[in-house]
Image (spheres, rainbow, N blue to C red):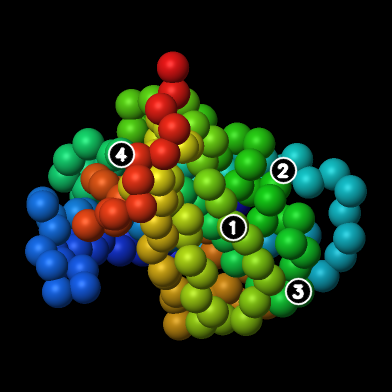
Amino acid sequence: MLIRKTQFIKETVFAEAGEPAPAPIRRVAALAVIANPFAGRFERDLTPLFDIGLRLGEDLMPEAVRLLDGPALVYGKAAIVGVNGDLEHAAAVLHPKLGKPMRAAVGGGEAIIPSTTKVAAAGASIDVPLANKDNPWSFDELDSITVALADAPRPDEILVVMAIGTAGRSNPRVGKGRAIT
């Protein structure tokens, strides 16, 4: 795996719609720009990308948790494939193995890790969906964090994002959703 660069983005939300949050909400996104070994060609066997997802999670998630400076309640993941790649390249990095190190770093997680992918040019932004790590029906935590890198992904790269947060929206008023029993 060739990593061109990594970046960590930390944001703190203090208020929304003119109302202070009951407590500051912290979010951290861990970004990695990697070479896409399958750019420019169709390949049926994408299993090498599975292990890349695993390694990225193992390498970046401990630092993301440290930067969060509190327990993670929400998580999500995303990837942008450069224009010489295939959308399935993003899925291969995100799905089969990345979840395990993400869950380990946040101390568990019973719910599926929400994700999104796209093919785009350098500088494109992506909205990383966030949801409660244990209850997918907890509407108050459904949110997103938008990230972008000005120079990534280049045509033969993949931008991979893992995101965590201490809470969902700052002043939710939609309802608690279903409880998991």
Seen in the image, is 45 located left or right of residue 79? right
The reply to whether dot 2 and dot 4 touch (C-beta < 8 Å) is no
C-alpha distance separating marks 2 and 1: 20 Å
Amino acid of disc 1: Thr
Q: Is residue 82 above or below residue 62?
A: below
Mark 2 = which residue? Answer: 48
C-alpha distance separating marks 3 and 1: 19 Å
Disc number for residue 73: 4
Disc number for residue 116: 1
**x%, y% of residue 114?**
53, 47
Mark 3: secondary structure: loop
**x%, y% of residue 102?**
44, 37
Which of the two discs, 2 and 1, sits closer to the camera?
Answer: 1
Amino acid of disc 2: Pro
User: Which of disc 1 and disc 3 is earlier in sequence?
Assistant: 3
Residue at (59, 57) in percent of width and height: 116
C-alpha distance separating marks 2 and 4: 30 Å
Disc number for residue 84: 3
Name which quarter of the figure residue 150 lies in: bottom left
Tell me the crowding category of disc 1: few under 14, some 14 to 19, or many 20 or more residues within 10 angstroms, Cα based. Answer: some
C-alpha distance separating marks 3 and 4: 36 Å
User: Which of disc 1 and disc 2 is earlier in sequence?
Assistant: 2
Mark 2: secondary structure: helix
Most distant residue in the top direction: 181
Tell me the crowding category of disc 2: few under 14, some 14 to 19, or many 20 or more residues within 10 angstroms, Cα based. Answer: few
The reply to whether dot 3 and dot 4 touch (C-beta < 8 Å) is no
Q: Is residue 145 above or below residue 101?
A: below
Residue at (76, 55) in percent of width and height: 88
Which of the two discs, 2 and 4, sits closer to the camera?
Answer: 4
The reply to whether dot 2 and dot 1 touch (C-beta < 8 Å) is no
C-alpha distance separating marks 2 and 3: 18 Å
